[in-house]
Image (cartoon, helix red, strand yellow):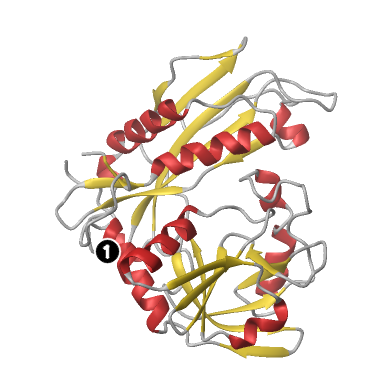
Amino acid sequence: MEKKNIDWGNLSFGYVQTDYRYVSNFKDGAWDAGGLTTDANITMNECAGVLQYAQTCFEGMKAYTTEDGRIVCFRPDLNAARMADSCRRLKMPVFPEEKFLEAIVETVRANAAWVPPFGSGASLYLRPYMFGSNPVIGVKPATEYQFRVFATPVGPYFKGGIRPLTVRISDFDRAAPRGTGHVKAGLNYAMSLYAIVDAHEQGYDENIYLDSATRTCIEETGGANVIFIKGNTLVTPKSDTILPSITRRSLLYVAKEYLGMEVQEREVKLTEIGEFEECGLCGTAAVISPVGKIVDHGTEYTYAGFGPGIQKLYDTLTGIQMGRIEAPEGWITVIE
C-alpha cells in the first residue's frame, strides 16, 4: 500500500486525523458487533456519564513497520488485559479481550497507509478508550458505554527527540493508597495537568511523584514509570499505586533474559536516589527517556544520561519491536 505523503522524520507527538477508527457500543447489557467508521466525531448527551463524573479509561500502544517491511504491534494482549482491569475498577463493562485485539488489528489494517516507514523514527500510535455515554445526574455508573480505537502517526514524545531530561521531585501527589493509581483512568491524568504545566514553567521536563502515604518512596511520573541502574543491577519502584507499565514489564524481562542483569522490583527510598548511576523514564510513548538530573528542592542528583545500561536496554527492546532481534514468543502481533 502506498504511504501517505508525510514528512515522517519531523512528526511531533500530536494528533493527526487518519481515515478510520473502530467503534462499539454497550447497551441493554451487551456489546454490539462493532466496526470501522470514517467519522472522527462523537455526539453525546450533555449529561453523559463521562462528562459529569469522568467515567473513562484508555490505553496507549503503537504499530510499527519492521526492518523486513511487516506492520506489527507490540504485546497488545497486555493492553487488553490492563484495560479490563481498569474497567472493573471503574464499574464499567469489560470490553472482551479477544474483541479488543480484533479492533486493534482492524484499525491498523484500515490505516496501513498511515504507518510510518521503517527507519523514520515515527510510529502509529493507537488509543483504545471507553467512556460512559448515557445521561447520568446522580453519582452512579452509566448504563451505556462506547469503546473506540483511533490511530495517529507520531514522532518522539519529548521535543527534540531522545535527550537527558531534567525532572523534579513534586510537591503534589499523583495517587492515594487504595485509589486508582494502578489503573489507566482518565481522572489520574487530569489531576497531573496542573503539576506538569507548573514543572514546565519552572524549567523541568517532568515530575517524579512520591508515595502519598509517607512521601518517602519514589513512585512514577505523570506519564511514565521510573527505572534506576547501578552497575549490572536494574531497580524499579514497586507500589500498589503505580500503573503497571507494559514497557517496564518488557524491560525487566529484557534486562534479565537478554542482558544478564540483576532485576529488583522493590521500594525505592528518596534517600537512596543519589546512589544510582543511571535513571530513565519508560513507557509506550517514549520507550526509554534517559534522565540527566533529578532536583529535590534545590538538591541535584546527576546521572549518566544515555549511559551504557540505558543504551543497551533501549537498543534491545527497540530491536525486538523493529524485528532486528528475535522476540520472545507472543510479544509481536503481525498485522500484515
Decide if residue 191 is on the left or right side of residue 232.
right
Q: Is residue 5 above or below residue 161?
A: above
The residue at the point 45 percent across, 68 percent down is: 288
Determine the residue positioned at 56% across, 62% down.
224
Farthest top residue in view: 28
Name the residue tied to disc 1: 319
* Place of residue 141 in the rendered image (x, y in percent of width and height, measured from the top left): 74, 25
Query: Could you tell me which quadrant the N terminus lies in?
Result: top left
Q: Identify which residue, 300 or 47, lies in the foreground.
A: 300
Q: Is residue 193 left or right of residue 16?
A: right
| Residue farthest to the right, as pictured | 138
SS assignment at label 1? helix
**Measured from the top left, where is residue 142 in percent x and y?**
71, 23
Residue at x 22% of width, y 61% of height: 325
What's the residue type where badge 1 is placed?
A: Gly
Q: Is residue 137 left or right of residue 157?
A: right
Picture quadrant of residue 261: bottom left
User: Dot 1, how many residues are within 10 Å of its Cα: few (below 14), some (14-19), or many (20+)?
Assistant: some
Q: Position of residue 195 (x, y in %)?
A: 73, 65
Tell me, yes or no, if residue 1 can be seen here: yes
Residue 46 versus residue 306: which sits nearer the camera?
A: 306
Instruction: Examine the rendered structure and indicate whether residue 182 appears above or below residue 143.
Output: below
- Measured from the top left, where is residue 280 in percent x and y? 51, 74
Q: Can residue 7 be seen from the camera position used here?
A: no
Question: Residue 335 versus residue 4: which sits nearer the camera?
Answer: 335
